Amino acid sequence: MKPRIGLTGRRMTAKAAGLGGSGLGHQAIDMYFSDYAQSIHGAGGIPLQLTRDGEAEDLVSVIDGLVLSGGADINPARYGAEPDPQLGEIDDGRDEFELALFAAARSRGIPILGICRGAQLTNVAMGGTLRQHVNMEDGSGHPNWLQPGDTVAHEVSCSPGSLIASLIGETRGVNSLHHQTLLTIGQGLTVTARAPDGVVEAVESSDGDLLAVQWHPEMLGGPDPVFFWLIDRATKGRIEPRQQ
């Protein structure tokens, strides 16, 4: 059987999503961008959307890998900071759900791929902090979240011998769709890719089960090598006994 990959997404009202008539505008919708599921499928996995209405432990018990997707900003209270005036939308329910998923997956040895917000959540879950807003106008950052997702915005340089370098090479062009960046790096994480201006673009764990990237590989054509890594790792986990 192909490995089952849990995929997180967003929750919003039908009105906010531009769906439903006036009588349905208040109804909640769980959704994700299809690129994630297409990448999981294309790499050989079975994509499963995870609803926050389930218990994290129960959900993790039936998946072999986890993708933490992009989305709203993480509440800075999660890492002991006051909100920046330019902080974007936050979703406390999603923060709580995904942090619980992360902890459950790590305790079971299930591989995790964090993407954009997912990379930021990974860092916060491991005790790190975030820079809440990158100001394009003062030259302090490179991201441009107004570009199309398939636009290469800059290159990243990957550490020789790292997991990410083994997947994409030591340099690669990536997109840039974020306005927050990793600041203090969480315990147990190693920075393995940076942008030319020093912004952290990838972190990973020494056990080989955790990879998080700041860009959106699912939008760059593919499926991207990071998804093949996740599927391969998840497949091995189905064969070898996991921690319970």
Image: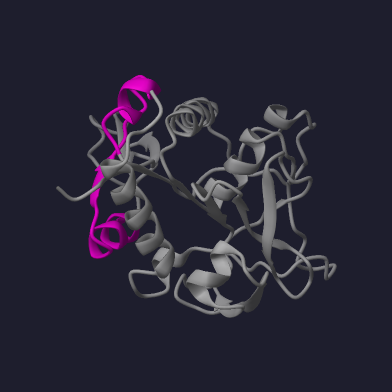
Task: State the residue at coordinates (58%, 36%).
Answer: 90
Which image quadrant is residue 104 in?
A: top left
Taking the spot 75% from the left edge, 75% from the top edge, the residue there is 196
Q: Position of residue 3 (x, y in %)?
A: 24, 47
Relative height, residue 11 to residue 5 (above, below)? above
Please state the horizontal and vertical placement of residue 36, each as a whole percent of the image. 34, 56
Of 52 and 23, nearer the camera is 52
Instruction: Specify the quadrant of the image occupied by residue 105.
Output: top left
Seen at 69% across and 43% down, the residue is 87
The answer to whether any part of residue 100 appears in the image is yes
| Left or right: 43 in relation to 91 | left
In this picture, residue 175 sits left or right of residue 182: left
**Residue lying furthest front in this view?**
240
State the residue in front, 94 or 169.
169
- Above or below: residue 10 compared with residue 57: below
Horizontal side of 126 relative to 150 (left or right) equals: right
Instruction: Find residue 60 and report its horizontal and vertical position in percent.
Output: 35, 30
Which range of residues does the magenta coloring cover? Answer: 34-63
Note whether 220 is above or below 4 in the view shown. below
Q: Is residue 133 magenta?
A: no
